[in-house]
Image (spheres, helix red, strand yellow):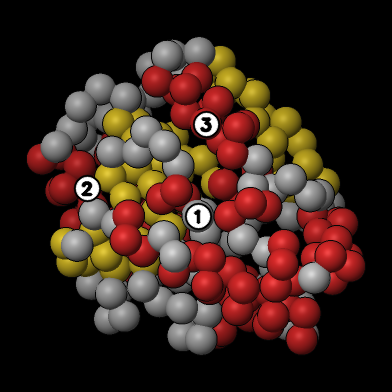
Amino acid sequence: MLEDVLLIEEKHRKVAAGIVEEILKNKKPKYVVAISGESGSGKSELTHVVAKEMRKHGIFAKPVHLDNFFKTLPLERREWREKNGVEKVVGIQELDWESIQQTVDDFKNDRKSTMPCVDLVTEQVDSLTTDFKGIDMLVLDGLYAVNTEGVDLHVFIELTYHETKKAQTARGKEKTDDLRMRTLEAEHKAVQSLKHKADLFVNMNYELVKA
């Protein structure tokens, strides 16, 4: 996402180092990593550090943020959720999974791929074209990233929105009100439903453990 705010701390670097070690042990061509967790849990920070660290090993890793793949536009999403009932519509089904899987398929087949890219300043959606030829690894991050088909390593951050309220405020993406809190609770339930897919957990102490 354009103009996203990353708050990288030492805990992110330590966990990322463990993820990189796990990747290197099981590396294969066109490797896909997915990092899931609730809002403010550090998905984007981990994704960034993992991708940067892979360069030290001669591996080009491309981060792809699944928040760009929501079916409803950012400027319309709050109103749409409120109108249709937060508890009914918030969840895995909000993402355009066909486009996500097409992106993964383009990566695996060294094709050029055009993806949506949200500009957080204007809250408009741009298009980003990437040539996946020469890209060795894809790092997907998002609430429901581990739901993606074709993933080789599933990472699940166990922190919930209750523990990450401070981080959400610091990032300042959305105002905190009743609608936002209801949305976070609905996302919490949807994210937790995917926990069983994890290969690695980032626990409540922000330590990496195997599932």
> Is 108 rendered above or below residue 90?
above
Q: Residue furthest left?
A: 25
- Percent position (x, y) of residue 175? 76, 78
Residue 108: which numbered mark, if any? Answer: none
Residue 144: which numbered mark, if any? Answer: 1
Crowd tier of the residue under label 3, counting other residues whose Cα lies within 10 Å: few below 14, some 14–19, many 20 or above: some
**In whole angstroms, how far apart are the C-alphas of marks 3 and 1?**
13 Å
Q: Nearer the viewer, residue 183 or 130?
A: 183
- Percent position (x, y) of residue 142? 51, 54
- Is residue 38 visible in the rendered image? The answer is yes
- Residue behind mark 2: 20
- Percent position (x, y) of residue 209? 18, 66
Q: Quadrant of residue 152?
A: top left
Marks 3 and 2, the one that precedes in the sequence? 2
- Residue behind mark 3: 101
**In whole angstroms, how far apart are the C-alphas of marks 2 and 1?**
21 Å
Q: Hey, what amino acid is under mark 3?
A: Gln
Q: Hey, what amino acid is under mark 2?
A: Val
The answer to the question of whether label 3 and label 1 lie on touching residues, with beta carbons closer than 8 A, is no
Discs 2/1, front: 1
Query: For numbered disc 1, what is the local secondary structure?
Result: loop
Q: Is residue 40 left or right of residue 173?
A: left
